Every structure is written in C-alpha cells, then in structure tokens.
Image (tube, rainbow, N blue to C red):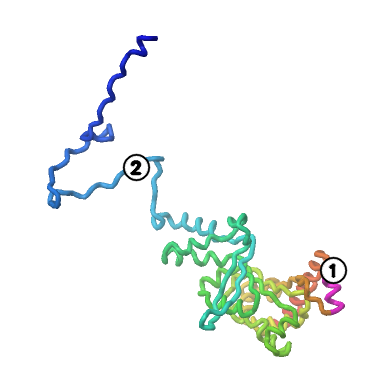
Amino acid sequence: MSGALNTRPSKRQRISYSEGEDDDTASPPAKNIQHGDITGMTKAEPAHTESNGRRTRGWADLPGELRNQIYELCLAPSPFPIAVRSVEDTENKSKLQWTSAPTYPRNKHLRPTVNLLLINKATYAECNTYLYLNHFYFFTSMDLSLFLKCLSVAQKLMLRNLTLLLPRPFAAITMGCGLTLREHSNFLLSGLKELEGATNLERLQLSSVDSMWSSKWLAVEIHKKARRWLEEISAKKGSNEKAAELIDVNAIHSPGHLFGDKDWQLAFLTRERYRMLSSSDTSILREELVKRMR
C-alpha cells in the first residue's frame, strides 16, 4: 500500500501537433508558404461529419411525392376555420387579414403551418393551393368578395368549405349607412357573384344571426347573385337538387342584442332547438332555390 503511494506517476505524454487527430488517416505534410504568397495554396476540402450516420438532402432535392405529403400535413384542413376580414390600410385601400383558429398557444399545433409558403417562390407555387382546402369564415360579403377576387383558377378549384355571416337586419341597415333593407341586400350577398369557378366547393354555409332572415328571401337573393355558379354545379352533379344541397343555413344566437319578444324567445332556445331551426331554414331555402333554378 505504502509502495503504491510512493510510486511517482509517469509523465503525461506530450501531444505532437504534427500528428493528425484522426488515427485512420494521416495528414499530408504542411507546405512552407510565406505569408502573402497564395500560389501554392489549394482549396480546403469540406469537413465530413458522420455524427448520426444520416444522409441529408436539400428541400428542392426531395421527391415530389414526399413534398406533396408534407404540404398536406402542414396545410391540410384544420379542425377550426380560418377567419377572414377586410381592413383599410393607410391609403384607404381594403386588404385582407386572416386569423387562424384556435388562438390559444396550447392549440398552436392545430393551425396550418403557413410559414411553409415562405421557403421560396418555387415552393409557394407548388403548395399554395393546399391552403385553400381549409374552412374559411367571412364576417361580411365584402370580405368574401375580396377573397375570391384574389384567387387564381387553380386556387378556386381547391375551395371546399366557406361560411358567410349574415348579421341581424338592424345591424345590416346600420352597416349600410342608412340604406333600406332591400337596398342593402345587394351588398349583403354580393360576394356570391365571385363564386363562379369554385366547382369543387362542398359546402356553402350562411350563418344567420338569430335566424332573422327569411329563407325564401335568401333563396331568391342567392339565385340572383350566384346563378352562374349554381349552373356550373348543377351541370357537374347532374341535378339542381344536388347543387342546392351544398348550401345550408346555420341559425346562431347573438346574446346582448335583444329588441323584441321574438328575440327574447330565441335567446332562451336550447342548442337542440337551434339545430332544429337551422334544419328547417335549410330545407325551405333549398326547396325554394330548386324552384328558381328550373
């Protein structure tokens, strides 16, 4: 024991800086080059690292089928709608802003990964149409009109699910700056004129606040504004009835806006009653719309 303690450890072997750090390959001898003289210098080879043995590829080098799968996963329909509204910029020009729901950070993974569109122009050209497979929600008919006018033919063909909010008649007159209800109807559903070309649309929903709009009147206005689109859908599906089935009315409640006995009754309707009201309004609208299309 004492002999082991008295034994002096051997000196640590000096590191020779002329030796290569890799035991498998020997470094070539360095050339004696004077500072400022670059005639004898050669371009250094890039370092080769194999930390995990994986091979890496550039984004553009991926097969097209794999990129398409990535586009579908990142931009595929979210379980929540994308809300679109128009705002005025500093030059009083209307532009669109969209809000991807849900807004809570913990649900961020449920939103479409739209930053994928910003990789480069080629990627945007490839995958921008996938974004339009989502459900879009519009607060006004002007929002819908601006949105549809911005789309190309290919983008319109990708549309599947659109929802337009119909405000209460009192709010509609206020929004129309003093116009009468009938005059304001031209603005209320004017965005439907731009639906032409969206022949793959699977659902057009009208969210009627407190179901205050007559379903028969809505059918007349829809036929006026979206007649060409309805004809396209009817020709594609083979019947007017199937074209009308794409449109439904969703009766929603607007708390805090109560102006009469009917409003108070609607305020206390149960969710099931609202479902029944929506179903009834939808049936009347479709029946009346088919009559107009004949």
Quarter containing the C terminus: bottom right
Q: Which residue is mark 1?
A: 268
Q: Is residue 63 visible?
A: yes
* Foreground of the two, 5 or 155: 5
Callout 2: 10 Å neighbours few (<14), some, many (20+)?
A: few
Asked which quadrant contains residue 227, the reply is: bottom right
Identify the residue shown where x is 36% and y is 12%. Answer: 4
* Foreground of the two, 172 or 160: 172
Kindly identify the amino acid type of the residue bearing the numbered disc 2.
Thr
Mark 1 secondary-structure assignment: loop
Q: Position of residue 63 (x, y in %)?
A: 43, 55
Look at the image and give the residue range highlighted in magenta. Answer: 260-269
Q: Is residue 294 visible?
A: no
- In the rendered image, residue 291 lying in the magenta stretch gets the answer no
Q: Main secondary structure of the magenta part?
A: helix
Identify the residue shown where x is 52% and y is 63%. Answer: 114
Q: Position of residue 207 (x, y in %)?
A: 71, 73
Callout 1: 10 Å neighbours few (<14), some, many (20+)?
A: few
